[in-house]
Image (cartoon, grey):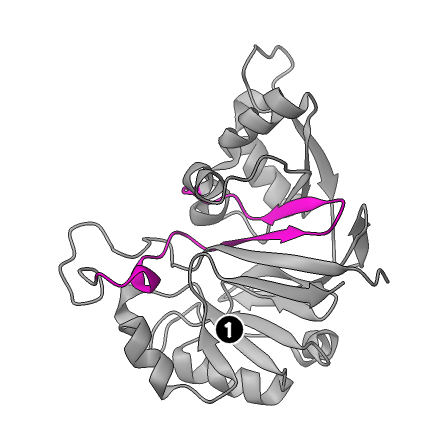
Amino acid sequence: MNNDKLHITFLGTGTSSGVPMIACHCVVCESHNMKDKRLRSSILVQSDLTTLVVDTTPDFREQMLRIKNDKLDAVLFTHAHKDHIAGLDDIRAYNYFQQKPMQVYATSATQKELRREFYYAFEENTYAGIPQLNMHEIDYKPFSIDDIDITPIKVWHHKLEVIGFRFGNFTYITDANRIEDSQKKLIKGTEILVINALRKEKHISHFSLSEAIELSKEIAPQTTYLTHISHQLGLHNVIEKELPPNVHLAYDGLKLDIEN
């Protein structure tokens, strides 16, 4: 395993509708606190040599501009729901400036949906300006992208398989409401756990706040960050005070340094 530091940036920490939500006038959506402004969930992972993103949300262009990210080597996908893939077309800018295809890592099931959604990028007779994608099929075996080692974690989003990713001592899981014991063993020992916590009320396909906290207790990382948050959870500053000492709400722009 590589010993260099990895730098994690939370590009978005919101659920599929983002926060604020269109046409909503609740206290969270009308909050002036920037930590209550949540683009769709995604992270940037950087080593000294490699930069990759987990999921290309509908906000991908805004996210890359917001952090002034000029280099991108690869995209990893957790699953094919629209709020995690819709921004893929905007990798065209990286194709243009880097003069090479984007390396894309996804399961066969997710690749099938990408090929359907972005059909024009995969047709035999293409045209100038389409996304240039070099597809890599992944399963649940560990793999590396250049100097970044990655362990996939299988989680369940109701009946849909979703992949979480462990990078060294950092584990990122979004869109889950169940994790099998065999997969929890792969997470154990992680120092930083990121897990989705949609709202306080139970949900059919996402961990609730209490469920995420219970999972954190079971895995016992040093620190847990909650992501994929809806406006229903509540104000950032209010909920943060209700959490255990080692559990925090993630927020857009949060940066972490970890061991690779």
Q: Residue at image x 42%, y 85%?
A: 210
- Is residue 117 or residue 95 the one in the foreground? 95
Quarter of the image where one finds residue 194: bottom right
Q: Amino acid at mark 1?
A: Tyr
Q: Residue at image x 38%, y 59%?
A: 15
Q: Please indicate, yes or no, whether residue 212 appears anywhere in the rendered image.
A: yes
Q: Please indicate, yes or no, whether residue 154 appears anywhere in the rendered image.
A: no
- Is residue 25 or residue 122 the one in the foreground? 25
- The magenta-colored residue range is 32-59
List x then y, in percent, for residue 259. Answer: 74, 67
Q: Residue at image x 55%, y 83%?
A: 215
List x then y, in percent, for residue 242. Answer: 35, 87
Position above or below: 153 against 120: below
Q: Is residue 195 magenta?
A: no
Q: Is residue 35 magenta?
A: yes
Q: Name the residue that disc number 1 marks.
A: 225
Q: Residue furthest left?
A: 25
Q: Quadrant for the N terminus, please.
A: bottom right
Q: Is 94 on the left or on the right of 259, as rendered?
A: left
Position above or below: 253 against 206: above
List x then y, in percent, for residue 23. Answer: 15, 51
Q: Quadrant for the C terminus, please.
A: bottom right
Quarter of the image where one finds residue 208: bottom left
Q: Is 165 on the left or on the right of 82, as rendered?
A: right
